Every structure is written in C-alpha cells, then in structure tokens.
Image (cartoon, rainbow, N blue to C red):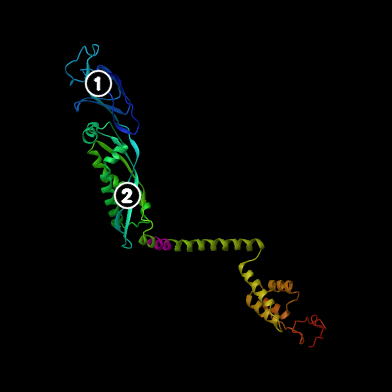
C-alpha cells in the first residue's frame, strides 16, 4: 500500500472538481491548496474538513472525525483512508452549448411555420462545493465544464428551445432579424437559467447566444428569404441610384464652373448645335428666332454659331437675340443672309437684289 505524504492538485484548468487518486494518507501528510481553490476531505462519503488556499498538515486535530490509530504495520505511522477533492473556484469561461435540433414556430410576419436553433457559450463557477459534490459529482473522479454541459443538457435544450420560439413569435421578431437581437435574447435566457444552476452549487455567470441555425434549403424559408431580400434591396438600390445621380450632377456643375459657363448656357449651346444642322432656305433665320427665344445669351450663341459654321448670323437674327429690331437681307438664290454693304452674295456669288 502506498501512503501519500504530499497532496496537491494535478488536474487541468477546465476542471471544477478533481479527486486525488491516492486514498491512503499518513497522519501529518501535507495538503497544498492553491489560490482560487478549495479542498474537501471525505471519509466514507462524509465531509471531514474543508481547507482554503495554503499548506495544511492533516492531523486528528484538523480532522476530528478520524479516530483510532493503526500502528506498527506502517513503520510507526498512523495511516487513515479518505478521499481528497480539489475544487476550482475560478470562473470557467467559454463552455460551448447548442440546441440538438430546431424548434418550430409561426413567423410573426407571414404566419409561415419555420424552424430555428441556437448556439453559444456560457461561463460557470462553483459557488457551493459541498452542494456540487452531493448533487452532481457523486463518485466521479473529475467534473469539468464538458461534464457540466452533459449534466445540464436537458435543461438547456428544453428552456432555450421553448423560449426561443416564444421570444420570436410574441416579440414579432422575423427570422431574418433575430441575429440583431442576440444581446436581448442572451440576457433573457440568462435570467431564466441562472436559478436552475444555483440549485446544484454552480453559478451561471454569463450566457451568450452567438448564432442561430436557420432552415436553409426549406422551400418555405427560401421563398420568404427571396421576398425579404427584394423588399430590403429595392429601397436600398433606389437610394444608391439617387446618391450616384447627385454625385454626377455635382461633378457636372463643378466642370461647368471651371470652364466658365452655366447649365442654362450649356442648354443654349445644345439648341444652337441642333439648329446648325438644319439645311434649306431660312435655316439661319429660324436659328435667329430660336436664339431670340433663349434670352440674354443670344449674342454669345451667335458668336458660337459663327465659330461652328463659319457663317455670321444675320443682323436680324442677332438683333432679335439681343432684344432689338433690324431688317434682314437674304440672298434670293441661296437664302443666306447678306451684309447690306455687299453687292454680291458671298455664298453663291449671285448679285444681291434689293
């Protein structure tokens, strides 16, 4: 028989409660308890003593439940049989959980039956080691986060799934909007589950819903997804188009400003170009009328047309564009305007006839 002389924690950091493998100790053995730990000494399933951080010597004084001494067989020592459990009081974070299946509920917007699941993580710590040992651990050699999740799986499955469906239906939360409400959902589930953990000597310090499982591939869900996407994207696309149009308009205005003309002048240039393309007798007379209608930019347009066509606008057209009146003289052969001082038409060479 091996008689342990020094007892200390040798488990991992994810374990809530760990039983030392040695069960026979000599009176006066050293018990080492680290910070954020607690040690429980049991004999025949009964707790004999509880020890906090530090170095402790196990004797009949601090373990008064031990009576009788076995001598001589072990070299004069006084061995006794008991169990030592080391308890971690630190917070065990990031314990993952998830619903094994999905819960079916009626979508609050369309009334279509849909299914949804959830997953996330919780944080636990021991609040009552004796209660934990009695209610959950029993004769297990170790009890950690994963073991705790196995023990509380029934609780999570039933409460998370039932509340998830009612939360979405009663709260009017669409399946496409639920991810925006994870903080609210997490807090509500925490409040519902925390009391149940306390009854087993554990404290639920955090609960986070990190994601949801949607029924991808389900025909009803896919139709609903397409409808929702269309409703969402239509105003977004219109807003984007409006923004682009405003940017283009601002850019065009800046270009005109740098080139030294206004939007009205740009439209006048466009009218002048169209009129310059017209052929036949009276074309430039019509141009003169059009320029007169444009308003205060007639003189500038007349100059622009002269540069584009190589011909001067008739005085009548210029006068009308400027808001004055004068008689126009045109060649009876080709219809082009003729300066009154010319004896011959500069365009067709015919003699000017008055």
Residue extent of the magenta highlight: 224-231
Give the CA distance from mark 1 to mark 2.
Answer: 50 Å
Quadrant holding the C terminus? bottom right
Classify 247 as above or below 50. below
- Magenta stretch: residue 279 in it? no
Left or right: where 223 falls relative to 126: right
Residue 247 location (% of width, % of height): 55, 60
Which residue lies at the image location 26% right of the left edge and 48% below the top edge? 158
Q: Disc 2 on helix, strand or loop?
A: helix
Indicate which label's residue lies in the foreground, 1 or 2. 1
Q: Disc 1 on helix, strand or loop?
A: strand
Q: Which residue is mark 2?
A: 185
Quadrant holding the N terminus? top left
Left or right: where 111 falls relative to 347: left
Task: Give me the disc on residue 34.
Answer: none
Q: Quadrant of residue 113?
A: bottom left
- Magenta stretch: residue 228 in it? yes
Which residue lies at the image location 48% right of the left edge and 62% below the top edge? 237
């Amino acid at each position: 028989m091996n008689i342990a002389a020094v007892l200390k924690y040798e488990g991992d950091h994810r374990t809530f409660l760990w039983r030392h493998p040695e069960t026979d100790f000599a009176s006066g053995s050293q018990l080492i308890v680290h910070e954020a730990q607690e040690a429980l000494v049991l004999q025949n399933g009964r707790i004999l003593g509880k020890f906090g951080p530090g170095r402790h010597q196990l004797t009949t004084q601090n373990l008064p439940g031990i009576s009788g001494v076995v001598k001589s067989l072990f070299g004069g020592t006084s061995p006794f049989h008991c169990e030592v459990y080391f308890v971690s009081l630190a917070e065990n974070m990031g314990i993952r959980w998830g619903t094994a299946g999905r819960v079916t509920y009626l979508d609050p917007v369309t009334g279509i039956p849909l299914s949804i699941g959830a997953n996330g993580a919780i944080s636990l710590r021991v609040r009552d080691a004796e209660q934990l040992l009695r209610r959950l651990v029993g004769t297990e050699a170790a009890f950690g986060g994963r073991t705790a999740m196995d023990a509380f799986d029934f609780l999570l499955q039933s409460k998370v799934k039932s509340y998830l469906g009612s939360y979405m239906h009663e709260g009017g939360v669409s399946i496409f909007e639920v991810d925006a409400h994870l903080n609210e959902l997490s807090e509500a589930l925490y409040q519902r589950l925390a009391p149940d953990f306390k009854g087993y000597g554990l404290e639920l310090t955090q609960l986070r819903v990190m994601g949801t499982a949607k029924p991808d591939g389900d025909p009803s869900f896919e139709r609903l997804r397409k409808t929702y996407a269309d409703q969402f994207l239509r105003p977004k696309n219109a807003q984007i188009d409006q923004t682009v149009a405003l940017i283009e308009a601002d850019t065009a205005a800046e270009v005109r400003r740098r080139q030294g003309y206004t939007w009205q002048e740009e439209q006048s240039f466009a009218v002048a170009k169209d009129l310059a393309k017209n052929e036949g007798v009276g074309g430039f007379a019509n141009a003169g009328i059009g320029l007169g209608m444009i308003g205060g930019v007639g003189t500038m347009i007349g100059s622009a047309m002269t540069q584009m066509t190589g011909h001067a606008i008739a005085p009548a057209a210029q006068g009308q564009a400027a808001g004055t009146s004068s008689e126009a003289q045109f060649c009876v052969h080709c219809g082009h305007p003729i300066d009154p001082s010319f004896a011959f038409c500069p365009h067709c060479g015919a003699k000017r006839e008055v």
